[in-house]
């Protein structure tokens, strides 16, 4: 019996598993996978890939386990559409949300992204035009998630 088809199947499933890793690790994991694919009999190449993949996926699982509970400010207009927005975020890679000033887009959308499962493999970004606005948004979202700024919520200027 030829072990090659089984090895190819394992290589294919290993490559697909990269999608469950942290976004920042995927490039390095693809490189390790390519080295293993070029030399399937190289146990060290396989071990390096599998170890890096397991570590990255473990970090994703830890992030999922420590995701803060999401609660919305029901007084904001965006709360009425929250279920639909979460479904759209899950279904599409890009979702454009337009709403009036004060409707909750800036403070509630990051929480809806969390509720949709985003943020475990990477970051949820929210751009602001000024440094003070970035700090204020981070402080507000962190407060609503009951977590300190710098833990699950942070900002970068």
Image: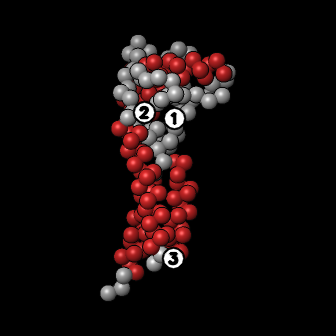
Neighbor class of circle 3 (other Cα within 10 Å; few <14, some 14-19, many 20+) is few
Residue labelled with disc 3:
39
Of residues 10 and 148, the one nearer the viewer is: 148
Query: Which residue is rendered at x = 43% and y = 62% of the image?
Result: 50
| Residue mark closest to the camera, 3 vs 1 | 3
Query: Which residue is rendered at x = 52% and y = 28% of the image?
Result: 150
Report which quarter residue 5 is drawn in.
bottom left
The secondary structure type at the circle numbered 1 is loop
Mark pair 1, 2: CA separation: 8 Å
User: N-terminal of the two: label 1 or label 2?
Assistant: 2
**Contact? badges 3 and 1 (CB < 8 Å):** no
Q: Which mark is residue 59?
A: none
User: N-terminal of the two: label 3 or label 1?
Assistant: 3
Question: What percent of the width, then of the height, locates residue 33?
Answer: 50, 65
Report which quarter residue 28 is drawn in.
bottom right
Pick the quarter of the image with the N terminus: bottom left
Residue labelled with disc 1:
124
Pick the quarter of the image with the C terminus: top right
Q: Which mark is residue 114?
A: 2
Q: Residue furthest left?
A: 1
Question: Does 117 appear above or below 36?
Answer: above
């Amino acid at each position: 019996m030829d072990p090659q088809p089984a090895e190819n199947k394992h290589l294919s499933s290993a490559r697909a598993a990269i999608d469950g890793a942290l976004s920042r690790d995927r490039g390095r994991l693809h490189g390790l996978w390519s080295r293993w694919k070029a030399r399937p009999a190289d146990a060290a190449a396989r071990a390096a890939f599998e170890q890096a993949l397991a570590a990255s996926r473990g970090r994703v699982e830890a992030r999922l386990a420590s995701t803060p509970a999401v609660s919305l400010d029901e007084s904001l207009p965006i709360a009425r559409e929250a279920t639909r927005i979460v479904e759209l975020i899950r279904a599409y890679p890009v979702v454009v949300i337009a709403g009036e000033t004060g409707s909750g887009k800036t403070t509630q959308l990051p929480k809806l992204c969390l509720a949709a499962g985003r943020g475990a493999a990477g970051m949820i970004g929210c751009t602001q035009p000024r440094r003070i606005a970035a700090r204020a948004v981070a402080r507000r979202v962190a407060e609503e998630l009951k977590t300190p700024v710098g833990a699950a919520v942070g900002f970068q200027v």
